[in-house]
Image: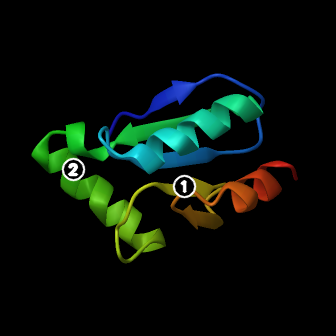
Amino acid sequence: MEAKKVQGKNKGKVMLYTLSTCIWCRKVKDLLGQLGVEYSYVEVDLLEESEKSKAVDTIKKWNPTCSFPTMVINDKKCIIGFAEDEIKTELAK
């Protein structure tokens, strides 16, 4: 599963799982861009079927409902949806 990387300030490992058609996913990407944070993302709906199932398995470890967007920070903290205040708080650390 190849993640795309967006350059910015290193705030630890920020991994974002999105859908290409999801407005809330776009809002999280825009927010990360405004904050200037480096992150990686995978647009799950654009993956090949075998890769998609691997991505879904990974997401379900953090977010059993497998909703989007799902952000995992430093393999410790999971933020689900467009939780602007929570995202800003976590990435300000």
Would you say 49 lies left or right of 52 here?
A: left
Q: Which residue is mark 1?
A: 71
Would you say 86 lies left or right of 60 here?
A: right
The residue nearer to you, when weighing 65 against 54, is 65
The residue nearer to you, when weighing 58 against 39, is 39
Q: Amino acid at mark 2?
A: Lys
Residue plotted at (29% across, 60% down): 56
Q: Seen from this angle, which residue lies furthest top? A: 7
Picture coordinates of residue 60, whole percent (x, y)? 37, 70
* Label 2 Cα crowd, 10 Å radius (few <14 / some 14-19 / many 20+): some
Residue plotted at (59% across, 65% down): 78
Quarter of the image for the N terminus: give it. Answer: top left
Picture coordinates of residue 19, whole percent (x, y)? 32, 45
Residue 52 circle label: 2
* Contact (Cβ within 8 Å) of mark 1 with mark 2: no
Residue plotted at (78% across, 29% down): 9
Q: Secondary structure at mark 1?
A: strand
Which mark sits nearer the N-terminus, 1 or 2? 2
